[in-house]
Amino acid sequence: MRLKEKVSVVTGGGSGFGKAIAILFAKEGSNIIVNDINDEAGKSTVELINNSGGKASYVNGDVSTEKCWNEIRDAALNEFGKISVVVNNAGFTHKNQSMFTVDEDTFDKMYAINVKSLFWSSKVLVPTIDNNGGSFITIASVSGLRPRPGLVWYAGSKAAAILTSKAMAVELAPKKIRVNCVNPVISPTGLIEKFMGMENTTENREKFLGTIPLGRMAKPDDVANAALYFASDEAEFITGAAIAWALYMADKYLFF
């Protein structure tokens, strides 16, 4: 097992990328703390893991707050005795629209969840990681590397998350804590209609597929597999990386 004896925190673990990451990590031997704001979804992931022979616990909370991370830390240490891997997956976006029509509350919420969560997770959890080191993994977005129209402020928040993660990688390297990013392209998760800015129909999906070189959307398992590599000892000498395996083609951007 690639994560045997590790303890992993996965935010937004009730659905989409986070659920796939939590389940895969558990299969590979890690004990899991699942965080979400949706109790039903988060507890469902925990139940799936525990019923499959793994060990997982659930912590409800808003990842943009210190309180949430204190509760995550306490749950992990009380249940499993340590923290090895932190996956900052929880995210938020505005609907695909003009940059001028996004309201301030949406902007603030997006930066709080997508960026401030990195501040609190590192501030609260880094002191708990022992001399054996650990791994922080940011699930950002290809939009943070190659933005597209209609998602200006979302792209900015993910670019901030990517650069913050790279800076963390440099500062935390002496502590043997690695920090890497996974940057998915659009995926059929619960946020797909916000990213598309239109109804999730086959016809509308085809418009987006035409802008992705590999010809399909990212699957939750794609993201989980990439995160697994970064969490494993196979990546013990990799830090500050930001992988994106399906960049949008710049000459095929869609304007709506």
Image (cartoon, rainbow, N blue to C red):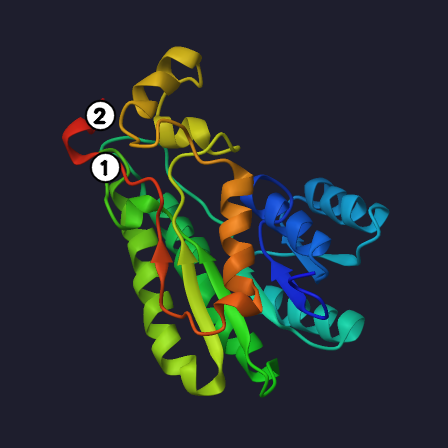
Residue beneath the point at 38% across and 19% down: 205
Tell me whether the residue at label 1 lies in contact with that at label 2, contact meaning CB atoms closer than 8 angstroms.
yes
x then y, percent, for residue 134: 55, 75
Residue type marked 2: Leu
* Quadrant location, the C terminus: top left
Residue beneath the point at 75% across and 46% down: 43
Q: Is residue 198 visible?
A: yes
Q: Name the residue under label 2.
A: 254
Q: Mark 1 points at which residue?
A: 148
Residue type marked 1: Arg
* Quadrant location, the N terminus: bottom right
Of callouts 1 and 2, the N-terminal one: 1
Compared to residue 128, the image places residue 120 above or below, namely above
Residue beneath the point at 33% across and 39% down: 246
x then y, percent, for residue 171: 37, 81
Find residue 243 and report its image quarter.
bottom left
Instruction: Give the secondary structure at mark 1.
Output: loop
Q: Residues within 10 Å of mark 2 (few under 14, many from 20)?
A: some
Compared to residue 246, the image places residue 251 above or below, namely above
Q: Residues within 10 Å of mark 1 (few under 14, many from 20)?
A: some
Q: How far apart are marks 1 and 2 (CA)?
A: 8 Å
Given residues 103 and 48, the one toward you in this image is 48
Q: Can residue 65 be seen in this view?
A: no
x then y, percent, for residue 100: 21, 37
Compared to residue 254, the image places residue 49 above or below, namely below
